Image (cartoon, grey):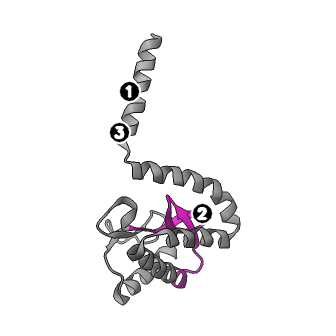
Amino acid sequence: MKRTQESAKSTAVGKTSETWTNEERAAMKERAKEMKAEARANKDKAAGESDVLAKIAEMPEPDRVMAERLHAVVKASAPDLTPKTWYGMPAYAKDGKVVCFFQAADKFKARYATFGFNDSANLDEGDMWPTAFALKELTAAEEARIGALVKKAAS
């Protein structure tokens, strides 16, 4: 019976490693580190912002410029949100829960960046509403729309 259990266990482990991509595994490891740091950062908003700015600085050029502008838009639209990293991405939380986040295109080798909202965001409109937006470029129109959405989400 012991051999059967060992065999099943090794199969399960092998299956797990095939299920997740290297990028996804790296994001999960990063999230585990973030959770440890969150207890400290929740007490100190400046530490969370410092972490976010450091992550933005690590991004390649097109994503970095977009992330810097989005960071400014979020801070101006909802100054009460707390900047923090979430799965290695810049995110903004209210009462410890992530409201919105920026996922760089380079993070998962996507063709566009994503600005998304979690279920704690107050964006409900009827029975269906968008929770993430693809971003290839950030113009003044997109900044204004994102600013309005962030303000509503944080309310």
Q: Which numbered disc covers residue 18?
A: 3
Specify whether 11 is left or right of 73.
left
Residue 136 placed where, x, y %? 31, 76
Give me the residue at 46% from left, 69% from top. 59
Q: State yes or no: residue 99 in magenta.
A: yes
Residue 24 placed where, x, y %? 41, 51
Type of residue at label 1?
Answer: Thr
- The residue lying furthest to the bottom in this view is 140
Give me the residue at 37% from left, 89% from top. 140
Q: Which numbered disc covers residue 149?
A: none
Q: Which residue is mark 2?
A: 96
Secondary structure state at the residue bearing disc 2: loop
**Which residues make up the magenta segment?**
75-104
Q: Earlier in the sequence, mark 3 or mark 1?
A: 1
Residue 16 placed where, x, y %? 40, 37
Type of residue at label 2?
Answer: Gly
